[in-house]
């Protein structure tokens, strides 16, 4: 097995692969055909993801991110965090800072290429995953020296349903993006160990640097190489440790440099999530075995997956949710130790590929309580899992070819079918949060987000039901009451909507959106004075809020104070010259002040700007009246 890890050149795409390994297959399969089939089945099972919507973080990270609209963001990404565009705004749900500049570059490139055309974004994600699948094949082909193991492992990787979260969710791409460099870093290292050329070690270090700039979990790569070094040599442990230390030096330099830049940009290396402050440290530690077992379960049986699993925290060592996972992990460790003499160097590396990338995500303190298990974190670990699975199936084929072929076929088909089905969950927000609610019915987050999805879909009664339940679970969160008011207002329950908004403002008097919504309802009731006060307070908190300023102008105009309305409309148009509705309303206020020529000119600009034909027809009618009066 030591020879296999020294690596061998893969057969050329113009030659049959590994003819002596499985002659009937080798007569047909060339390297190029294997690669074509791998990419074809990977693309095929993800084809239905191309019609998916912007989901979860996508509306904020892509649709509402002004930085993506400028190529200057390519440089800005390296000295800012992923959510920097929200810093300094009145947003109440700003995420914790992440330093992932290559992810920000990816988003910027995607916006410049596709704008808000979602199929283009999904195609980009799919191409990244297909590229990672190809890289996995190349790595395992070189590590094992056996095309069948590499092809089967890469097929399992390409079809594995746990990757849906990384591929079908646009903003979930960082793990797959990191793999696009993580795997070539290992591949270059394999070339270095085979050929001894330092250029391959340099290439590996550069690829490692790119990987960690996509996502910090790639920092696990030196641990994989350390295990690789320990497993491949048969010298003394002292010699192995010295050898590993020498080859790990470039990776240590890259790691130190990355951490220094991260500290300079974020002001910290890590953090504790605010929601985790409520959970005792002992409970977090006792929950870790359950998390590990959950991840292994999702790798082995990846069916009916979800964004949220509602995994409870373990508070007692006598709890079966602690005892059973610890027993299972101890059993696995004991079996590994008992059969350690039969564990090949190849299997050691596969285990390192499986468990090393899991270690960073076991720091549960950095996650929201409901996000301690996320399938996208299995993207890198699945490489090791697929490698081990393929190795076991090929090993079984030596004795029972039919059984091994049946197991491989059933696994691939079931994985592919589950991925196609799982893509449907990520098609729209309603399906996504309905699945989450099935796992976590007591999750206010799932209820709240499902309510928002229903609101967006104009299913107001369903939205109100979910938001009422979310408010029952978390009565102190103003954003829930604010959105509940929107559903109630649409349903005609004006008094209830006002009460909900007042509750929201009781918890957070500075909530701009709630002020604006309350003012809108009061405006519709004809209480212009009270409405103007709400809009004024909203602008005090956020002077850049164009919706609040527009509403303030409308309220002033409705109260007959057109001079004040004109000032606000002109301020809006100075910031947003193409706002057709502001142009139209400004024209009406000009007309009310007897400034007919200005009113006509402004109305003509509004008509030329307006894209809605029905609204443009209304403006034409108003223009005709202005001309007739003039």
Image (cartoon, rainbow, N blue to C red):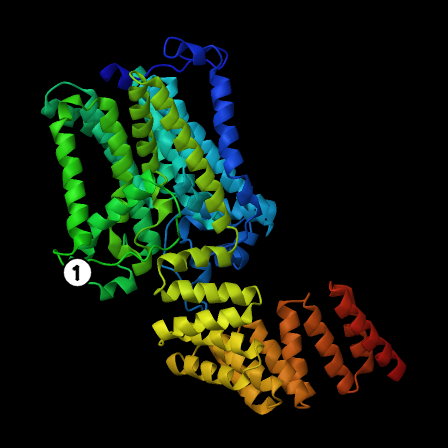
Left or right relative to 267: residue 132:
right
Residue at 32% across / 21% down in the picture? 394
Tell me residue 512's x, y (percent). 48, 76
Q: Which of the 4 image quadrants contains residue 209?
A: top left
Name of the residue lying farthest toward the right: 628
Q: Which residue is mark 1?
A: 315
Q: Is residue 247 visible?
A: no
Residue at 29% across / 20% down in the picture? 395
Quarter of the image that includes the C terminus: bottom right
Tell me residue 358's x, y (percent). 27, 42
Residue at 37% across / 50% down in the picture? 99
Residue at 50% across / 25% down in the picture? 37
Secondary structure under tag 1 reads: loop
Q: Which of the 4 image quadrants contains residue 433?
A: bottom left
Tell me residue 124's x, y (percent). 53, 41
Relative depth, front residue between 503 and 66: 503
Q: Which of the 4 image quadrants contains residue 328?
A: top left
Q: Residues within 10 Å of mark 1 (few under 14, many from 20)?
A: some
């Amino acid at each position: 097995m030591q020879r296999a890890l020294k690596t061998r050149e893969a057969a050329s795409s113009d030659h049959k692969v590994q003819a002596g390994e499985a002659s009937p297959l080798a007569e047909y399969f060339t390297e190029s055909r294997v690669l074509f089939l791998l990419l074809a089945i990977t693309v095929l099972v993800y084809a239905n993801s191309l019609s998916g919507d912007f989901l979860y973080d996508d509306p904020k990270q892509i649709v509402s991110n002004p930085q993506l609209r400028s190529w200057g963001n390519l440089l800005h990404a390296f000295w800012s965090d992923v959510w920097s565009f929200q810093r300094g705004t009145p947003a109440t749900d700003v995420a914790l800072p992440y330093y992932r500049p290559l992810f920000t570059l990816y988003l910027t490139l995607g916006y410049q290429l596709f704008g808000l055309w979602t199929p283009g974004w999904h195609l980009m994600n799919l191409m990244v995953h297909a590229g990672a699948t190809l890289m996995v094949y190349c790595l395992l082909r070189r590590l094992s020296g056996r095309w069948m193991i590499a092809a089967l492992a890469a097929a399992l990787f390409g079809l594995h349903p746990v990757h849906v979260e990384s591929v079908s969710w646009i903003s979930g791409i960082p793990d797959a993006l990191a793999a696009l460099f993580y795997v070539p870093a290992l591949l270059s290292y394999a070339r270095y160990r085979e050929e001894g050329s330092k250029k391959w070690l340099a290439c590996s270090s550069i690829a490692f640097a790119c990987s960690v700039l996509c996502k910090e979990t790639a920092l696990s790569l030196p641990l994989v190489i350390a295990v690789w070094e320990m497993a491949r040599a048969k010298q003394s442990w002292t010699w192995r440790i010295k050898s590993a230390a020498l080859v790990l030096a470039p990776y240590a330099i890259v790691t130190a440099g990355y951490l220094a830049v991260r500290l300079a940009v974020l002001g910290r290396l890590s953090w504790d999530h605010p929601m985790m402050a409520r959970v005792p440290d002992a409970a977090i530690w006792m929950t870790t075995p359950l998390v590990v077992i959950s991840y292994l379960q999702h790798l082995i049986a990846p069916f009916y997956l979800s964004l949220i699993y509602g995994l409870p925290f373990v508070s007692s060592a006598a709890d079966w949710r602690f005892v059973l996972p610890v027993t299972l992990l101890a059993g696995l460790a004991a079996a590994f130790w008992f059969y350690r003499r039969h564990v090949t160097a190849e299997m050691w590396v596969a285990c390192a590929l499986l468990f090393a990338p899991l270690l960073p995500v076991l720091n549960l303190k950095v996650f929201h309580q409901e996000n301690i298990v996320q399938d996208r974190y299995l993207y890198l670990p699945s490489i090791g899992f697929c490698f081990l699975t393929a190795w076991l199936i090929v090993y079984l084929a030596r004795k029972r070819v039919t059984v091994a072929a049946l197991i491989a076929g059933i696994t691939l088909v079931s994985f592919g079918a589950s991925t196609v089905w799982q893509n449907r969950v990520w098609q729209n927000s309603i399906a996504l949060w309905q699945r989450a609610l099935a796992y976590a019915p007591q999750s206010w987050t799932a209820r709240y987000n499902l309510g928002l999805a229903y609101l967006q879909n104009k299913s107001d009664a369903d939205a109100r039901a979910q938001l009422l339940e979310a408010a029952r679970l978390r009565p102190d969160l103003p954003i829930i009451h604010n959105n509940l008011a929107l559903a109630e207002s649409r349903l005609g329950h004006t008094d209830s909507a006002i009460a909900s908004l007042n509750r929201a403002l009781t918890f957070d008097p500075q909530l701009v959106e709630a002020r604006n919504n309350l003012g809108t309802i009061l405006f519709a009731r004809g209480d212009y004075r009270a409405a103007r006060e709400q809009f004024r307070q909203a602008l005090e908190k956020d002077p850049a809020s164009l919706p609040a300023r527009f509403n303030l102008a409308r309220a002033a105009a409705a109260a007959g104070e057109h001079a004040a309305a004109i000032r606000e409309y002109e301020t809006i148009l100075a910031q947003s010259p193409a706002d057709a509705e502001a142009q139209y309303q400004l024209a009406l206020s000009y007309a009310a002040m007897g400034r007919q020529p200005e009113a006509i000119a402004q109305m003509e600009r509004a008509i030329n700007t307006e894209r809605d034909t029905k609204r443009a027809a209304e403006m034409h009618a108003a223009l005709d009246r202005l001309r007739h009066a003039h």
